[in-house]
Amino acid sequence: MKQKIVVKVAMNCQKCQTKALKVVAEADGVDFVGLGAEKDRVEVIGNGVDAVKLATSLRKKVGRTDIISVEEVKPK
């Protein structure tokens, strides 16, 4: 099942944003990674991505992380 996960990450600088995007891109099943409309949000789209593991690894490597939403992506 393809899903969209939105995570709020405490990113204070450009280096933090880059690090957060790299951590997310290395996760299993990720197809797309991008910054949300607000600069502290990271949007992830992928197949079988574990939101909890993703948030845990972001907490360890970047800083405070909160899962905002996890929703299924409907095929067009």
Image (cartoon, rainbow, N blue to C red):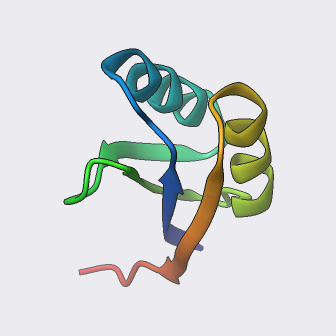
Residue 27 spot, x, y in % from top left: 66, 36
Q: Residue at x 49, y 58 (%)?
A: 8
Total labels: the figure holds 0
**Residue name at image x 29 percent, y 46 percent:** 35
Relative horizontal placement of residue 51, taking residue 7 as reference (left or right):
right
Q: Position of residue 56 (x, y in %)?
A: 79, 47
| Foreground of the two, 69 or 15 | 15
Name which residue lies at 24% across and 58% down.
38
Judging depth in this view, the residue of 70 and 66 nearest the camera is: 66
Locate the C terminus by quadrant: bottom left
Q: Quadrant of residue 13?
A: top left
Q: Is residue 76 left or right of residue 22?
A: left
Q: Is residue 76 above or below residue 61?
A: below
Quadrant, the N terminus: bottom right
Lateral position of residue 43 relative to residue 58, left or right: left
Q: Residue at x 52, y 48 (%)?
A: 9
Question: Which is more toward the observer, 20 or 16?
Answer: 16
Q: Is residue 17 above or below residue 45?
A: above
